[in-house]
Image (cartoon, rainbow, N blue to C red):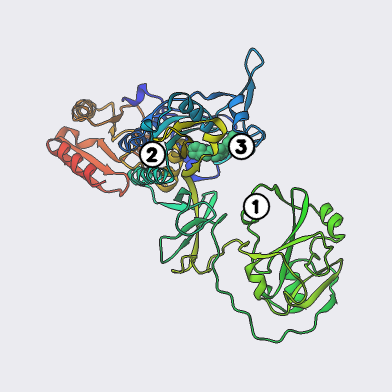
């Protein structure tokens, strides 16, 4: 492709509202442009990378036996009513009416559509298992789109859906997708971890997230420094063998603590460390009060609290609700002397504190020498806290470390949630009607492009892995006014393409510096400069990633290029 007749609007300055490297670089390298908040156009270079990413995904999905389809982005709301999900999503699910005033949604995901499609056309167990996938645009009206295409309102997803006749069958389908994802993300050259993303029950989990490790990821991963354990901190289980100190239990004492509210205030006031305090946080479960206790040096894991009440709507109580239920300000809440209708649950660690400090449920007062069981009771002690760096790994091997991650893939065992709701049944070999057992598997295609950029750039610009690079070679005629240089560069352009290389040919009448800066920014893996030594048949070859520079005679150029590319 000749750059003088192409469209790569590179930018020197960093756009003000782009906070992270991938957003800045994809704008500056002329890959994307924002059309509206969270809505992007892909310019030629961006489109070529998308295409390469999609091709690799397609190859591995087809190799795994999945079959490609294409579903509509506009979905009848009736299907979401049938699945019971229409009410589950607020403004994030974009809705519209057609000219006949009929209700539709813009596809945020396609469980309903694919299940209704399979229900109508797959009836016998002989047709199962089947795994159907698409690569298609999704719509989710994020409240705060940010980080460019990492969190946008319109994005490209590969979503696959498997249908089996047994749990064992689903396990096979799931493993096939898990393995295909591992191959896909390896081919992108990504540093990623498959992370448990369900209740974290060790072994037999029913969902994994594929996380790309970067500093700017929106998710935090807890991983062991000595084993394969890795889990989203939202659900990482905590397995600590606490021990109770053998100090004697002192008499409970109520202490006046004016203006002492935070854990630090308490530590300074009582000269006692936070691991000997009890933090009480008031929630509501379906509007009923729930007091959650954790040790002073721990944090409540809200997902774990929600999992205690699988159908309940669990929310942090507002200060007004704290007043209403406990007649007390937050900051002085505690488990002692509560009204009987307040349910109390506690993290396991609370059971092992001795002579602790906690709020007295009275403005300006705390208790000290608080001992669980003696001074307060709870309805259950269970794992309710966020895992922390330094905790032992739940699998007993090594210590927990944190890493930020970008979720680029997510695989789920769905079971019969949608097949029962939508009546996707099959006749088993006894002629009995059974609901199909489903799995679903997503890859954020456009998000993956940004994740690759996040992991592969330097101070001069992009550094494309050869598997997804928009072109293989950046050929530059350094001074197009020099007859010898232009003639040789034109010749090489034809020869390199004859050798089936994708070449971006910069023959623009620009200064050398501009061309080299653009080449570094665009980040193609190999650059060939046709300059002063063109008359001697010598060109300059640069490997973008390592900065390695070679002077090569035209006669050896093709062989040198092939060798360099094979080593990338
Ligand atoms: C919605 C909206 C947002 C959503 C969903 C539905 C996430 C929703 C979960 C999934 C599960 C899997 C198939 C591919 C892999 C992921 N955000 N999810 O269902 F209406 Cl607005 O999408 N779906």
The answer to which of 45 and 122 lies nearer the viewer is 122
Q: Residue furthest top?
A: 100
Q: CA distance from mark 3 to mark 2?
A: 36 Å
Query: Which of the two marks, 2 or 1, is nearer to us in this view?
Result: 1
**Residue 128 x/y as whole percent:** 38, 34
**Residue 312 x/y as whole percent:** 69, 48
* Other-residue count near label 3 (Cα within 10 Å), few / some / many at <14 / 14–19 / ≥20: some
User: Which structural element holds mark 1?
Assistant: helix
Q: Residue furthest front?
A: 430
- Left or right position of 347 against 220: right
**Residue 131 x/y as whole percent:** 39, 34
Residue at mark 2: C-beta within 8 A of ligand 1: no
Of the image marks 2 and 1, the number of the one nearer the N terminus: 1
From what the image shows, is residue 482 above or below residue 198? above
Q: Which residue is mark 1?
A: 306
Q: Which residue is mark 2?
A: 517
From what the image shows, is residue 309 above or below residue 399? above
Q: CA distance from mark 1 to mark 3?
A: 22 Å
Q: CA distance from mark 2 to mark 1?
A: 52 Å
The image quarter containing residue 255 is: bottom right
Residue found at x 35% / y 23%: 4
Q: Indicate the quadrant containing the N terminus: top left, top right, bottom left or bottom right.
A: top left
From what the image shows, is residue 11 above or below residue 274? above
- Left or right position of 205 against 301: left
**Residue 368 x/y as whole percent:** 78, 77
User: Which structural element holds mark 2?
Assistant: helix
Residues under numbered marks 2 and 1 in contact, where contact means CB atoms less than 8 Å apart = no
Q: Which residue is mark 3?
A: 142
- Left or right position of 269 against 80: right
User: Which structural element holds mark 3?
Assistant: loop
């Amino acid at each position: 492709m000749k750059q003088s007749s192409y469209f790569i609007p590179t930018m020197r300055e960093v756009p003000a509202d782009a906070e992270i490297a991938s957003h800045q670089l994809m704008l500056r390298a002329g890959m994307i442009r924002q059309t509206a908040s969270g809505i992007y156009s892909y310019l030629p270079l961006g489109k070529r990378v998308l295409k390469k990413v999609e091709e690799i995904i397609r190859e591995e999905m087809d190799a795994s036996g999945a079959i490609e389809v294409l579903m509509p982005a506009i979905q009848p709301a009736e299907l979401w009513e049938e699945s019971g999900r229409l009410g589950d999503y607020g403004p994030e699910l974009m809705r519209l009416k057609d000219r006949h005033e009929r209700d539709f949604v813009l596809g945020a995901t396609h469980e309903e559509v694919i299940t209704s499609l399979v229900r109508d056309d797959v009836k016998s167990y002989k047709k199962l298992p089947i795994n159907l996938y698409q690569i298609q645009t999704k719509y989710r009206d994020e409240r705060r789109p940010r980080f460019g295409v990492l969190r946008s309102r319109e994005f490209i997803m590969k979503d696959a859906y498997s249908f089996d006749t047994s749990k064992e069958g689903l396990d096979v389908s799931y493993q096939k997708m898990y393995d295909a994802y591992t191959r896909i993300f390896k081919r992108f050259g990504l540093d990623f971890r498959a992370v448990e993303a369900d209740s974290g029950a060790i072994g037999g989990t029913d969902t994994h997230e594929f996380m790309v490790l970067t500093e700017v990821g929106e998710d935090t991963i807890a991983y062991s420094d000595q084993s394969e354990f890795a889990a989203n901190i939202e659900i990482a289980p905590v397995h600590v063998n606490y021990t109770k100190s053998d100090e004697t239990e002192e008499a409970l004492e109520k202490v006046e603590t004016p203006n002492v509210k935070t854990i630090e205030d308490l530590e300074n006031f009582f000269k006692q460390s936070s691991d000997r305090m009890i933090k009480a946080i008031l929630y509501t479960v379906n509007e009923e009060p729930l007091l959650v206790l954790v040790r002073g040096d721990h944090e409540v894991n809200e997902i774990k609290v929600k999992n205690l009440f699988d159908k309940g709507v669990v929310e942090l109580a507002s200060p007004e609700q704290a007043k209403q239920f406990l007649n007390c300000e937050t900051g002085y809440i505690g488990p002692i002397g509560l009204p009987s209708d307040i349910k109390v649950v506690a993290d396991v660690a609370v059971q092992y504190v001795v002579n602790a400090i906690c709020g007295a449920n009275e403005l300006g007062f705390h208790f000290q020498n608080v001992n669980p069981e003696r001074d307060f009771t709870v309805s259950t002690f269970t794992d309710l806290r966020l895992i922390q760096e330094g905790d032992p790994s739940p699998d007993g091997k090594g210590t927990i470390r944190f890493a930020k991650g970008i979720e680029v893939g997510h695989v789920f065992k769905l079971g019969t949630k949608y097949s029962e709701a939508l009546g996707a049944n099959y006749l088993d070999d006894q002629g009995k009607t059974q609901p199909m057992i489903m799995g679903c598997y997503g890859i954020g295609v456009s998000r993956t492009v940004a994740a690759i950029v996040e992991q592969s750039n330097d101070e001069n610009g992009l550094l494309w892995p050869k598997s997804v690079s928009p072109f293989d070679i950046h050929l530059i005629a350094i001074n197009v006014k020099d007859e010898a240089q232009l003639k040789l560069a034109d010749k090489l352009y034809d020869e390199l393409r004859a050798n089936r290389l994708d070449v971006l040919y910069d023959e623009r009448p620009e200064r050398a510096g501009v061309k080299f800066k653009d080449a570094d920014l665009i980040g193609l893996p190999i650059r060939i400069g046709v300059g002063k030594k063109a008359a001697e048949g010598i060109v300059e070859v640069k490997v973008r990633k390592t900065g390695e520079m070679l002077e090569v005679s035209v006669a050896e150029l093709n062989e040198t290029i092939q060798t360099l590319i094979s080593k990338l």
